[in-house]
Image (cartoon, coloured by chain):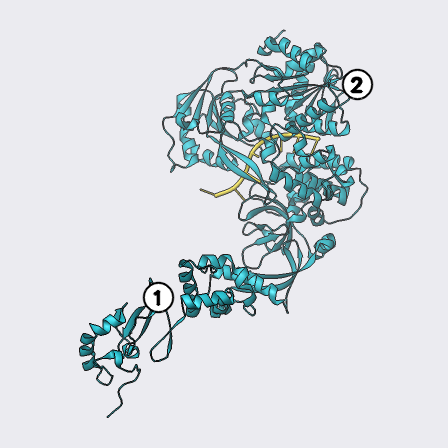
Amino acid sequence: MIETLPIHDVLDPLIDSLRASGRAVLQAPPGAGKTTVVPLAILQAKVSDGLIVMLEPRRLAARAAAERMAQTLGEQIGDTVGYRIRGEAKVSNKTRIVVVTEGILTRMIQSDPELSRVGTVIFDEFHERSLNADLGLALCLEITDALREDLKLLVMSATLDAEPVARLLGDAPVIASDGRSFPVQTQWLERPSRKETRFENAVADLVHRAVHETEGGILVFLPGEGEIRRVEALLKGRLPNEVALRPLFGAMDFAAQRAAITPAQSGRKVVLATSIAETSLTIQDIRVVVDGGKSRRARFDPASGMSRLVTESVTRAEATQRAGRAGRVVEGTCYRLWSKGEEGALQAFPPAEIETADLAGLALELAAWGAGPEELAFLTPPNPGSYAEAQDLLRHLNALDVDGRITEHGKVLSALPLHPRLGHMLVVAGPEAAPLAALLADRDPLGRGAPVDLALRLLAVRDFRGFSDRHSYLANRGGVERIKQEAKRLVKQSKSAVKQELSDAEMAALAYPDRIGLRRKGDAPRYVMSGGKGAIIPDGDPLCGARLIVVTELDGNVREARIRQAIQISESEVRSLFGEQIVWNEVCEWSKRDRQVIARKQEALGAVVLADQHWRDVPSDVMAQSMLAGVKELGLSWSAAAERFAKRVELVREGGEDLPEMTEAALLETLEDWLLPYLEGVKTAQDWKRFDMLEALRGRLSWEQMQRLDQAAPAHFTTPLGRKIPIEYGGVDPEISLRLQEMFGQTTHPVVGKTPLRVTLLSPAGRPVQTTMDIPGFWASSYADVRKDMRGRYPKHPWPEDPTHADPTLRAKRRR
DNA sequence: CTCTCCCT
C-alpha cells in the first residue's frame, strides 16, 4: 500500500537543497509524515555517503520511528534502519539509518569529533529546543565549518518560526509542508475569568460546560499533580455517571498511565493531564481539549545552584499544540480558560532549555570539546549566570582546572551518562555507589507524602521485599526496577575498581558537598547548608532530629528550600571526607538579633559551623569595622551637643562655606571616614546609645575650618554677665533664651555673622516673657509694659526703669 | 495551597 502524505510533495525540493547547499530547514506541522518519510528519501536519493543519523527528543519516539521505517522497507529493525538510545542499541553493519535520542549524538561527537562515519544529521522536532538538540546542532555546525564540508544537516521543525534557525545554518533554504490534521474549533471565554475565582473551580466549571456541549473524549491540561487531584475532587459527583475521570502525569506508574490512555470501553472519559499529553503521550479517542492555560516549568537559579518550579501562563505555541490534540482523528473542539482579548498578552514560545536549565552537563561537554560558549553558534546562547555557576561546580568536583580546562577526572565524568555530581560520586566511591547514582538520577520511587530519609529509598532498591515488610509507603515498583537495571549498567560502564567502602551518606556527600546541612538552634527543623542556603525538613518527619544531614533533593523555594530527600551523616564522616576544606575562621560581625558585635572563632565547612568558640583579644580595628554595620542599622546616636554642632556646620555650609556635609544621610554614607577611629570600646547597641559623636564630628574639621565655623556660627553667646550660653541652631534662626535680667546693659542686638539671634527673654521663673529680634527696640518700647506686670509678680527681682544702664544679674535684690 | 517534562 502506498500512503500519500503531504510530505511527499516537498521531497524533491528538499533533496535538491541538501545536495546544493548541504543544509536545509524543513518546516512541517504534525501529521505531515516527516519523521518516517524524510530519512528514507534521503537514503534513496543517495544524498550523502555514510550513516544518516536522526535525532529524536524521546526514546519512545526514536524506537517507534525506526520500527516504522523498517516496516516500510519490509525489513527487521537493525537491518537498514536501526536505533540507539541510552542503554539499548539495535544496529548492524548493514545499518544506514540510525535513529538516536539527542544525548547520544553528543557522545558520538565526543568519541569521534569528525563524525567520520556519518553523512547526514537530521534534527527532528527541533522546535522543542532541548538542551541536547541545541548543543548537538552547535557542535555539528562547527564540524561542518572546520572539518567536514560534506556533512549534510537537516533541521525539521513544526513551528512557523523557522527563520532564525535557517539564518543560523547560513541562510539555508526553508522548505514548508502542509500537515494533515482536522480542524479544531476554539471556544474562548466571553470575558477574562475573575481573579477571585480559584483556578481549580474555574477549570471544573469549564470541563462541566464541555461535557454538556460536546461528545467524545475530553483532555484537560493542568500544570501539575496537585491541580489534577483537586480538579478531580471537584468534578466527582458533578458529572453524569457514565463519565470516567482519569488522571495522567509522569509520576504515575506505567500501568496507570496505560489505563488513562487506552480508549474507554463505554461511556465518556475525561483525562486530567499535565504537559505529558502535549507531545509525549498520544490519547487516541480525544475530541475535545480543555486548556487551563498554565504550564509548570523548571528554572535554574544560579544564585542557589538549584532548580525551582514556576507556574506560568501557557505560550501561544503550547496552546496551539494542546488544541491540536483534539483534531487527530476527526474535527474537534478546544475550550480555553482565557478570553480572546487576553491571548495577545501570551508569550509566543516557551524559553529554550539552554536558557533555564542547570548547565553543568553542557559546561562539561564544552570543556571536553575545548571551546567556550561564545565560540560556538548557538541559536540561543547559554544563560551566562547558570553557565558560570556550572563551571564553579565543575571546579569543585575537580572536573575543570583553575583556568577552566577539562581535567583527566573531568574527561572520565563526561563519558558517563550522569550529571557531573553523580558521575563524580561514582568515580570516587566506586561501583558501590551505582545504586545511589541511579536512584538520585531518577524520579523519586516513593510517592507524595513519603518521609525524607534517603535510606528508605536505598532499602527499596537493594531489598524491595525487606522494604515492603517494614514500611507501608507506596513505592513505585516499576520505578524501583528501572533504577536497579540502571545501577547494573552503571557498574559496567564505570569500569572502576575503586573500593572505598564509604557509607551511603558519605557517597551522597561526594555528589553534594555544598548541601551538607547542619541543624540550626531553635525548635523548627531548619538547616543551614555548607553552600550557604537555608533549608527546612517538613514538620514531624523522623529525620527532623538529625544534627547533620546530606540534602540530596530540595525544592527551589527562594527564602528557604524544602528538603525532599536527605540522609543523616555523622560529624566524623564529614571530617574525614572534607578534612582539607574544614578551616578555622575568625568571625567578627554585628548581630542584628543580639544587637551587638559578636566575635567568634569557628571551625567551618563552608557555612556549616562544626565548632564555635569565643574570640578573645579581637584587634580593635576589626571590632570597630564590625561595629560600623551596627551603626548603619541603629542609625546615628545624637547627643544634644553633637546635634548642635552638626547644625552649626550645616548653617555655615548654606552660607556657601566649604565644610564637610553633616546631614544624617551624608554622615551615614561616610561613616568609615569620620567615625571609625573613634569607635574603640563600642560594641553593643547600648554602648552606641551612650556614645557622644561630638568629638568625632569635630574631628572631621581641620583647625582652619573650625576657626571659620566659630566665626560664622559660634557655639556660644556671651551674656553681659560674662556667662557663655549655647546658641540653638535647630530652627529657622539661631536662637538663645536667657533671663531678662541677664540682658541688662545690652544695647545692641546679638548676631552670628550677619544673622540676628532670636532671643527669648525669660521670667525669673524661667517662663518666656518675650521673643525679640531687636533688643534695643524692646528696651525702648514693650519693656515698660513687661516691667509693670512683672514687678508685682516678682517683687524681689530688679526691674529698673532704664535697663540699658542697669547691671545684669541672675539674683534677687538684696534684703534691705 | 508539596514537583512539569525529558535525556547521555
The three-letter code of the residue at mark 1 reads Pro
* Residues at circles 2 and 1 in contact by the CB criterion of under 8 Å: no
**Residue A665 vs residue A599, the one in the foreground:** A665
Callouts 2 and 1 on one subunit? yes
**Residue A93: mark:** 2
Chain A image colour = cyan
**Residue A734: mark:** 1
Above or below, A204 against A761 in this view is: above
**Residue A200 vs residue A352, the one in the foreground:** A352
Q: Nearer the viewer, mark 2 or mark 1?
A: 1
Mark 2 or mark 1, earlier in chain: 2
Q: Position of residue A494 (x, y in %)?
A: 77, 37
Q: Which chain contains the residue that carries disc 2?
A: A
Q: Is residue A223 among the parts visible in the rendering?
A: yes
Q: Position of residue A691 (x, y in %)?
A: 49, 69
The residue positioned 25% from the left and 91% from the top of the image is: A815
Position of the C terminus of chain A, as image quadrant, is: bottom left
Chain B image colour = yellow
Q: Position of residue A468 (x, y in %)?
A: 64, 42
* The image quarter in which residue A469 lies: top right
* Mark 1: secondary structure: loop
Q: Is residue A71 among the parts visible in the rendering?
A: no
* Mark 2: secondary structure: loop
